[in-house]
Image: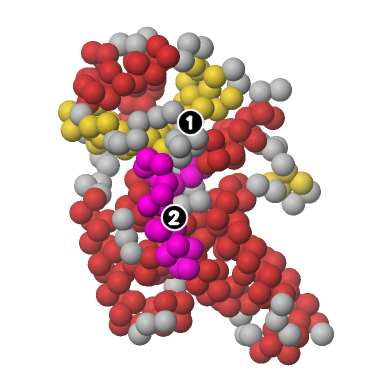
Amino acid sequence: MGSVRAGTAEAADERRQLVNVAYRLLGSVTDAEDAVQDAYTRWYGLPQDRQEEIRSPGAWLTTVTSRICLDLLGSARARREHYVGAWLPEPLPDRTEWNHTVGAGPTGSADPADQIVLDESVAMAFLVVLESMTPAERVALVLHDIFRYPFAEIADVLGRTPAACKQLAASARRRVDVADAPATGTATGRAEVVRRVKEAWETKDIAALVGLLDPAAVMTADGGGLVGTVLHPVEGGARIARYLVAIADKAPGLELLERSVNGVPGLVARRAGTVMTVAAFDVSDGRVTRIWAVRNPEKLRPWTRQDSCHSH
């Protein structure tokens, strides 16, 4: 009986790791939480003798969670064909900046977004590239390159040979290399560029914004059909600058905050205490090359929930 209890305790300890895997696979905190919950339901549904046979509950749970994510990625492709406008991953706040105590119980935060380790593998630029991959490529790359799972275990998830999984990871890596002329400049340099964008946006200085944006910059917004936003990417620094100033004109009282978004300097736009937009940036050679603006309120729950506590 003791070994079952130990196995169950180990299974419970895995939750944080599983949420991290699932978020990188799905780009959605809510879907990641559902996938992990589903995996646990299956674990606790196993007969006791079957649980005892499983040498590593953690490995079993990772395999099952990854398979659930693989199925979800397949159906998500179909769902996204009906999504209004561009689909962007859910942005993550840095809880040390946004709020220290929200939802925290005796064991720390209850919010799954707070379980996610903010490193380069959750930067919006990287998650957007992951979106361009096939589900199998994405699973192979995330499990192998980020979480260091051997191809023999990934083969079990994907139902393919280890050699085929190795090829999938290699083709996924090529997509990352093509998309990712790596962002240049230090984190401080990036933060400085974002700060200057914020100041130019607040003062509606189109010339300053044009100077901060790469001439070939692209801005993508995700409103999910629930709030007004551009349905197609805005291309070109000058067009983006004019668009940003038009937004500021339409939303008097918009307050811009410099906050980390998925571990990278970003901006949060708040109006009357409500988070309206979370913007992530890619910066190269001192200029903004990409802006991802998430406006879909369903994707801003970790920000609104935390913010409501933050502002009191």
Residue 131 x/y as whole percent: 36, 54
Q: Name the quadrant of the C terminus.
A: top right
Q: How crowded is mark 1: few (under 14 residues within 10 Å), some or many (20 or more)?
A: few
Using the image, determine if residue 244 lies above or below residue 54: above
**Where is residue 112 drawn, in percent x and y?**
62, 51
Q: Which residue is drawn at 45% across and 62% down?
A: 75
The spot of residue 39 in percent (x, y) is 62, 69
Left or right side of 251 for 102 = right
Image coordinates for residue 140, horizontal then vertical, percent: 38, 70
Q: Which mark is residue 79?
A: 2
Residue kind at label 1, given as amino acid type? Val
Considering depth in this image, is 120 or 133 the residue closer to the camera?
133
Residue matched to label 1 = 227
Q: Is residue 87 one of those drawn in magenta?
A: yes
Residue 265 counted in the magenta span: no
Q: Which of 184 and 121 is in front in this view?
A: 121
215, above or below 200, in the image: below
Q: Quadrant of residue 5 in the image?
A: bottom right
Would residue 186 be visible to someone looking at this image? no
For the point 66% across and 23% down, the residue is 311
Q: For mark 2, does the 10 Å Cα neighbourhood hold few (<14), some (14 to 19), or many (20 or more) residues?
A: few
Distance in Å between CA atoms under marks 1 and 2: 19 Å
Sooner in the amino-acid sequence: mark 1 or mark 2: 2
Residue lying at the far left of the rendered structure: 215
Q: In which quarter of the image is residue 172?
A: bottom left
Magenta range is: 70-94
